[in-house]
Image (cartoon, rainbow, N blue to C red):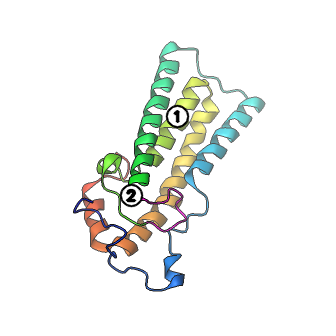
Amino acid sequence: MSESQVGPDTPPPNAPRNRAAEADHAHVHVPPPMVHGLSILLGMGAAGLLPLRLPPSGWLTATGALLLAVAGILAGWGFREFQRSRNPVPPNRPVRALMTRGPFRFSRNPLYLALALLHGGMGLVLANGWVLLSLIPALLIVRYYVIPREEAYLRRRFGVTYAAYAARVRRWL
């Protein structure tokens, strides 16, 4: 365990002391994969009603494929860090440790970044303008609903350790 990581055997500052407090989590009831998935489906549905096709372009398709590949690599790397830290992936479960290694050295939200890349990549590969446009509300929901709840929870759970991490690592990139 690195010195910047609070582990399961090291109670973090303001650690829960009773059973009710152990259930403490970020209270995110609509997980980001669902936000992006529904947005993509709405974009595809809108295209069925009023097509908004992107112009045929090998460059757009190749860019979309590249975004999908980067999303897959980033997500795999992030999931590996979740497994390594023994943290749950769903944002409505208590975390055991503050993750500061792997992709979390560069982004506080690498899995959300991966979802955004996946969403954009799908829009480009499908040449579907509605799927690309649906990325905007998905990002706004993640940014203004999910992330503030998670950050508030992590500040409560890890105190100054999280504050120092947030000061040195950007939210997205």
15 or 118, nearer to the observer = 15
Q: Position of residue 153 (x, y in %)?
A: 44, 70
Q: Position of residue 82 (x, y in %)?
A: 43, 53
How many angstroms separate mark 2 from mark 1 (CA)? 29 Å
Horizontal arrangement in the rendering, residue 166 relative to residue 60 (left or right)? left
Instruction: Name the residue carrying label 1.
Output: 120
Vertical arrangement, residue 12 with respect to residue 68, above or below: below
Q: Which mark is residue 85?
A: 2
| Residue extending furthest toward the right | 49
In the rendered structure, which amino acid carries the disc numbered 2? Ser
For the point 31% across and 56% down, the residue is 100
Question: Does the magenta segment cover residue 87?
Answer: yes
Q: Which mark is residue 105?
A: none
The boundaries of the magenta stretch are 85-95
Vertical arrangement, residue 2 with respect to residue 106, above or below: below
Q: Residues within 10 Å of mark 1 (few under 14, many from 20)?
A: many
For the point 41% across and 39% down, the residue is 74
The C terminus: image quadrant: top left
In the rendered structure, which amino acid carries the disc numbered 1? Gly
* Image quadrant assignment for residue 36: top right
Instruction: Tally the numbered discs.
Output: 2
Tell which circle, 2 or 1, labels the residue nearer the N-terminal end. Answer: 2
Q: Position of residue 155 (x, y in %)?
A: 37, 71
